Amino acid sequence: MTTPATVAGKVFLIIYGLFGCAGTILFFNLFLERIISLLAFIMKACYERQLRRSGLLPANFRRGPAVSGVGSLVGWKPSVYHVMLILGIFAIALSCCASAMYTAVEGWNYIDSLYYCFVTFSTIGFGDLVSSQKAVYQHQGLYRFGNFMFILMGVCCIYSLFNVISIVIKQILNWVLKKFECRCCPKCHKSSTRLSRRNAITPGARLRRHNVAVDTDGQYDSDTEGRRLSGEMISMRELTASSKVSLAILQKQLSETANGYPRNVCINTRQNGFSAGVGALAIMNNRLAETSDSRTEPEPKLCC
């Protein structure tokens, strides 16, 4: 139970804690980022293996530098719910193994050992149960090394799990608030009734709505943003431009299907649930959708 006793030691602890805690949070965030990258790589490898078994790809197929999306995991990011499930299972398994060690070495019962694991891994630290406090242990060096590894991995898993759970809670709260807003606000009913039908969409409307979905979480400035009311007409130029956009999207989908690439690659990286920030754990939530900017490559331009 080491604590600072002098004034200089306490001042040093405050200064060192500012940088030490920040570096520790960065380490935990990088741990979660690598977990997501590993899951994305496994999903991508399983998909390519399935294509090879079905004969759509040759057995010795390797993606060259000219192929779109080489070395990129865009579109393969796992869902936030899958990450939460995997982290939860791993944290439970780690806690059970650590509790077995504490029960055998410290003499605690198994429930107290599980309680100690959660309090320690979540960095709550009540101090009612503290490991490695006896003067002598059998295989003391091995036990202290195992205690260190269990606490390190446990804190990483629990912190990452809390980070993912905070994102899920935010999504649930946004969904509940949206439901209450639509039921309680009379303006929502009027606007939804007035704009229930769309006669035509301008060519730039789809791009404007897409950009808003990627960059911001807000809604449109006006009720008629990106859509036309019933009874309005579009010009021949707008119709031609809309056809070109549809043709370009169709060409891209056909190219991806012919090369055996997944069709779920989407520029909107919010589809997997990792976006924005939540409280103090929001340092790298904006990076969870894309593991690294260096892996992202621009998509090839399509000629219409």
Image (cartoon, grey):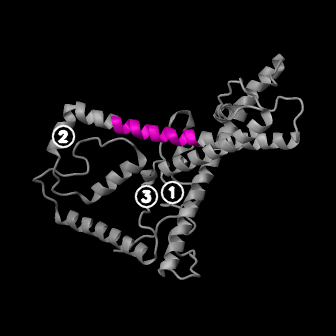
* Amino acid at the residue labelled 2: Ser
Task: Please say if the residues under marks 3 and 2 sit with CB atoms less than 8 Å apart.
Answer: no
Residue 30 seen in this snapshot: no
* Amino acid at the residue labelled 1: Lys
Task: Determine which residue is flagged by label 2.
Answer: 191
Task: Determine which residue is flagged by label 1.
Answer: 77
At 54% from the left and 73% from the top, the residue drawn is 49
Task: Determine which residue is flagged by label 3.
Answer: 267
Q: In which quarter of the image is the C terminus?
A: bottom left
Q: Residues within 10 Å of mark 2 (few under 14, many from 20)?
A: few
Q: Nearer the viewer, residue 246 or 62?
A: 62
- Of pointers 1 and 2, the one earlier in the residue sequence: 1
x and y percent of residue 149 in the render? 75, 44
| Image: magenta residue range | 161-176
Q: How crowded is mark 3: few (under 14 residues within 10 Å), some or many (20 or more)?
A: few
At 53% from the left and 63% from the top, the residue drawn is 43
Report which quarter residue 281 is drawn in.
top right
* Amino acid at the residue labelled 3: Ile
At 22% from the left and 57% from the top, the residue drawn is 201
Q: Report the predominant secondary structure element of the magenta stretch.
A: helix
Q: Is residue 169 magenta?
A: yes
Q: For mark 1, give the secondary structure.
A: loop
x and y percent of residue 94 in the render? 66, 45
Q: Does the magenta stretch include residue 175?
A: yes
Residue 300 seen in this snapshot: yes
Task: Please say if the residues under marks 1 and 2 sit with CB atoms less than 8 Å apart.
Answer: no
Distance from Cα at disc 1 to Cα at disc 3: 12 Å
Q: For mark 3, give the secondary structure.
A: loop
